[in-house]
Image (cartoon, grey):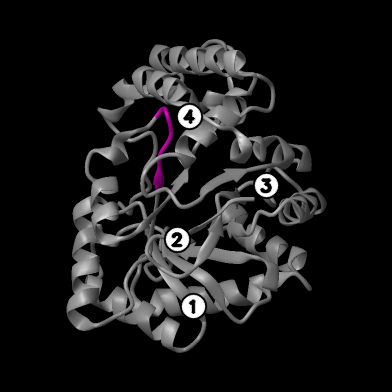
Amino acid sequence: MEFRKLGDSGLKVSALGLGTNAFGKRADEKTSIEVIHAAIDAGITFIDTANIYAGTESERIIGEALRGRRHEVVLTTKAGLPRGAGPYERGSSRRHLMAELDASLKRLQTDYVDLYQIHTFDPETPLEETLRTLDDMVRAGKVRYIGASNYYAWELMKAVGISDRLGLNRYVSMQTSYSLADRTPERELIPMCLDQGLGIIPYFPLAGGILTGKYAAADDAPSGSRADTDPGFRRFLGDKTIALSRQVNELAGELGSTASALSLAWLMKQPAVSTVIVGATRAEQVQANLASVELKLDDAALARLDEISRPFREGEPFAIYRLS
């Protein structure tokens, strides 16, 4: 396994990480634990979850899986997106974050998380309040590092500026949708992170499965796929994304690889990317994804991938989660 620093921090993370939003939902507890153990055994140390995944089941299952193995991983969770309909069940106020962190630690069966991420920007809470709360968490030993997710570049830069001005712990990472089918972060977010020393953590690196080649047409969703179980996902299955998937698959065939491994390997080559989180609902998928770490891409392959995915630098992000 290849290890990289998370931004300019001293925290080292595996180039390939494990996403866990399917645990307790599309993967039952037994299978989820098998996936986690397979990932750790293969050298994956970065495990990403959130307080809302599968209605908190993801965190609880991870806590069970890490009994006796907590020291082997970099464990990260998030808070900020709605946990319910009430006025105190969302956002990044001091009240909400402190309550959610304690609840997450209990479910995860640990007294600290390595990285605590704000799941999205909260327009109703002053950034200084959020950042002072996170700084207090670090000083209390409950959190080692802090990160953000789903921030616009100007919001992230404002947060970094406030932390620097007040001498607070600053964000070391930014989690965002990023893939061959969504290169919009390259316009502003990635240049900002490179300038300020933040590591990028892409989510939806396979565009929700589109880049695996499983969708031959917009109206042809395999049984059990995301487009089959979530009809709203079909909005992403346009002619452009299907054509991109086909081209990635063709190139992967020429390189003796798979479309998934090729797409992940491309992300790992991009500036500022520290670790790429990929979900799995079976241990076999973890093994398949590991091929991306070993895949060597020459200049010709990188140029071809850049060419076919360049249109996806423009337009709207593939996914972004915001508080309404």
Of 311 and 149, which appears nearest the observer? Answer: 311
Amino acid at circle 4? Gly
Residue 318 on image: x %, y %: 38, 33
The disc placed on residue 25 is 3
Q: Is residue 157 left or right of residue 14?
A: left
Q: Secondary structure at mark 1?
A: strand
Label 3 packing within 10 angstroms: few (<14), some (14-19), many (20+): some
Main secondary structure found in the magenta portion: loop
Q: Earlier in the sequence, mark 4 or mark 2?
A: 2
Q: CA distance from mark 1 to mark 3?
A: 27 Å
Residue 47 on image: x %, y %: 60, 58
Amino acid at circle 2? Leu
Q: CA distance from mark 2 to mark 1?
A: 15 Å
Please name the residue that numbered disc 1 is placed on.
Answer: 143
In reply to whether residue 64 is colored magenta, the answer given is no
Q: Secondary structure at mark 2?
A: loop
The residue segment tinted magenta is 176-181
The reply to whether callout 1 and callout 3 are in contact (CB within 8 Å) is: no
Mark closer to the observer (4, 2): 2
Q: Secondary structure at mark 4?
A: helix
Please name the residue that numbered disc 2 is placed on.
Answer: 6
Q: CA distance from mark 4 to mark 2?
A: 33 Å
Of 152 and 69, which appears nearest the observer? Answer: 69
The reply to whether callout 3 and callout 4 are in contact (CB within 8 Å) is: no
Please name the residue that numbered disc 4 is placed on.
Answer: 232
Q: Earlier in the sequence, mark 3 or mark 4?
A: 3
Q: Residue at x 46, y 52 (%)?
A: 274
